[in-house]
Image (cartoon, rainbow, N blue to C red):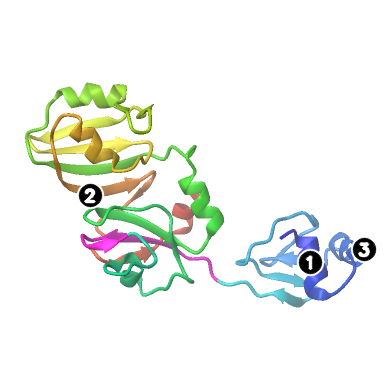
């Protein structure tokens, strides 16, 4: 909500009175004096007027989770445990900023900040995601050029964005994607008749799991949050 409308509503005063308060420097957001009534206010912001707290605000949460196999990337599920079980939160407290398949491990982000997660998951946000891939058969070196060129997915009638493949050994590779199509990694290797047997997401943009143990989570740093 706009700041001026929020003040008028919570303080039960007129817009004219609100404009006088703003002009006189009597309104602060997160301890910073604000004069612009059009400023967008979120539930996390602390709003004060004439030293009266109008909105206390509540903490924004940004978490990095090392997802193990067997957990569903959902807030609720009738048969499987969810990633929210790992952080001890409910669907009212956190939501997922992206997803991983049931048997895919690695970096997953959770938050209660809808604006932040929408920016992160917008189709136009081409943050690179790096996956470590294990396959049933030896990886054909021809995959490198084919993935870089892009593969045509007939079901969606589209060609994937260029992807970088680094072959680590005969059955292991590191793949960098800039999009997130349905089962994309499995389908790309399936194009070469090679089944993916293990998939692990190592990074999203500048964020890396590092040495975070599987099944555990930590809060993002202010710099990591600002990176998106």
Q: Front-most of 164 and 31?
A: 164
Residue, disc 3: 16
Q: Residue 27: which disc?
A: 1
Label 1 secondary element:
strand
- Camera-nearest residue between 84 and 52: 84
Residue 37 forms part of the magenta stretch: no
Cα–Cα gap, marks 3 and 2:
56 Å
Q: Residue at x 24, y 33 (%)?
A: 188
Image: 180 above or below 209:
above
Q: Which mark is residue 79?
A: none
Label 3, secondary structure: give it.
Answer: helix
Q: Quadrant of residue 43?
A: bottom right
Taking 156 as reference, is 42 left or right? Answer: right
Q: Magenta segment, which residues?
A: 59-72
Q: Position of residue 19 (x, y in %)?
A: 88, 61
Q: Nearer the viewer, mark 2 or mark 1?
A: 2
Residue 200: assigned label: 2
> Which residue appears at 33% of the width and 59% of the height?
73
Crowd tier of the residue under label 2, counting other residues whose Cα lies within 10 Å: few below 14, some 14–19, many 20 or above: many
Q: Mark 1 to mark 3: distance in Å?
A: 14 Å
- Up-down: is 132 above or below 145? below
Residue at 25% x, 39% y: name it: 185
Residue 32 visible (yes or no): yes
Q: What x and y, as percent, mark residue 225? A: 47, 54
Please report whichever mark, 1 or 3, sits nearer to the chain's N-terminal start.
3
Is residue 62 one of those drawn in magenta?
A: yes
């Amino acid at each position: 909500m706009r700041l001026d409308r929020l003040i008028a509503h919570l303080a039960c005063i007129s817009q004219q009175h609100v404009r006088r308060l703003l002009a006189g420097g009597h309104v602060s957001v997160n301890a910073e004096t604000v004069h612009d009534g059009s400023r967008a206010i979120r539930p996390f912001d602390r709003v004060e007027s004439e030293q009266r707290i109008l909105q206390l605000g509540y903490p924004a949460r940004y978490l990095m989770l090392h997802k193990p196999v067997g957990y569903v990337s959902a807030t609720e599920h009738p048969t499987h445990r969810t990633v929210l079980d790992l952080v001890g939160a409910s669907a009212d407290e956190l939501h997922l900023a992206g997803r991983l398949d049931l048997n895919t491990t690695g970096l997953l982000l959770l938050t209660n900040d809808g604006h932040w997660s929408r920016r992160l998951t917008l189709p136009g946000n081409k943050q690179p995601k790096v996956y470590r891939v294990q396959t049933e058969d030896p990886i054909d070196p021809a995959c490198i050029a084919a993935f870089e060129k892009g593969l045509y997915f007939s079901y969606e009638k589209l060609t994937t964005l260029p992807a970088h493949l680094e072959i680590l050994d005969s059955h292991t590779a590191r793949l960098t994607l800039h999009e997130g199509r349905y089962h994309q990694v499995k389908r790309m290797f399936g194009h070469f008749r090679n089944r993916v047997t293990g998939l692990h997401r190592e990074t999203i943009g500048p964020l890396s799991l590092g040495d975070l143990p599987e099944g555990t989570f930590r809060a993002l740093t202010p710099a990591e949050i600002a990176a998106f």
